[in-house]
Image (spheres, rainbow, N blue to C red):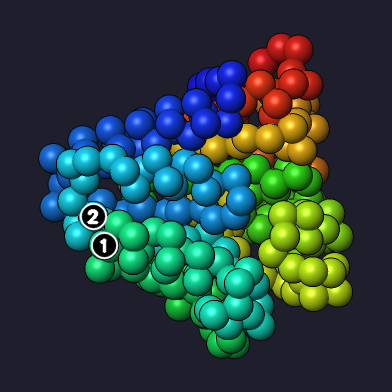
Amino acid sequence: MVQIFSTKAELAAAAAALAAERLRDLLARQSQVRLLAATGASQLEFLDCLAAAEGIDWQRVELFHLDEYVGLSRDHPASFSGYIKQRIVDRMGIVQYHLLDGTRDAREMAAEAGQTISAAPVDLAFAGIGENGHLAFNDPPADFEIEDPYLVVELDQACRQQQVGEGWFATLEEVPRQAISISIHQLLKTREILCVVPDERKASAVRACLVGPISPEAPASILRVHPNTTIFLDTASASLLSTI
């Protein structure tokens, strides 16, 4: 399902309302909810709205996140584990969480995170789409087949340039060339995915992923095979769509 909103603020509010509804419903039926969360500039307004939602027992939410740069410590301004800790864990009062440590041996960290997330199904995931069409840090051409839950991946120049454009790094040279990322295969195991994609700079990627062929060259196109995904767009990110 694709939903298009007039403004970025309306998109964020609608996505957060659905996320809160799903979390409340799950917590009414289960003792614990396993949640997978994205990071980055595109998620900020959505998380602000979600933080204001009432009636969510965050202490019964077990949190995982999508990815982390290899070699970056949690106190680096661009660290995704730092982002998760500050903007979700501490803010919402989550007590069960698993942060990817970019300073550890990357393959050992990926293997450990894979074992933890594989222990039970993930109920809900928040995701985004990169300017190059990536899901998490699965840059094109993404591996649709590998079953490892987390991977060590190479970041392409478009992905790295996006991080500079968003202000996380001052120069391209500062952006790490590798990351630990959840795999496409593992992400698609999530029972429900909410994909938040605002801004005109995402328009080309949105068109490639929603209108073009399902292909590793447009990694987020694989969301079209998932039976329970909602993609939230604003008029800017949807501006190149003629048909869906």
Q: Amino acid at mark 2?
A: Trp
At a point 54% along the width and 38% down the height, the residue shown is 196
Relative placement, left or right, of 111 versus 130 is left
Q: CA distance from mark 2 to mark 1?
A: 6 Å
Residue 231 in view: no
**Vertical arrangement, residue 211 with respect to residue 165, above or below:** above
> What is the secondary structure assignment of the residue under circle 2?
helix
Relative placement, left or right, of 154 versus 74 is right
Contact (CB < 8 A) between labels 2 and 1?
A: yes
Could you tell me residue 10's position as x and y percent? 50, 26
Name, please, the residue furthest toward the top: 243
Residue 90 in view: yes
Q: Earlier in the sequence, mark 2 or mark 1?
A: 2
Label 2: which residue? Answer: 58
Could you tell me residue 183's position as x and y percent? 58, 57
Q: Residue 161's image quarter?
A: bottom right
Label 1: which residue? Answer: 93
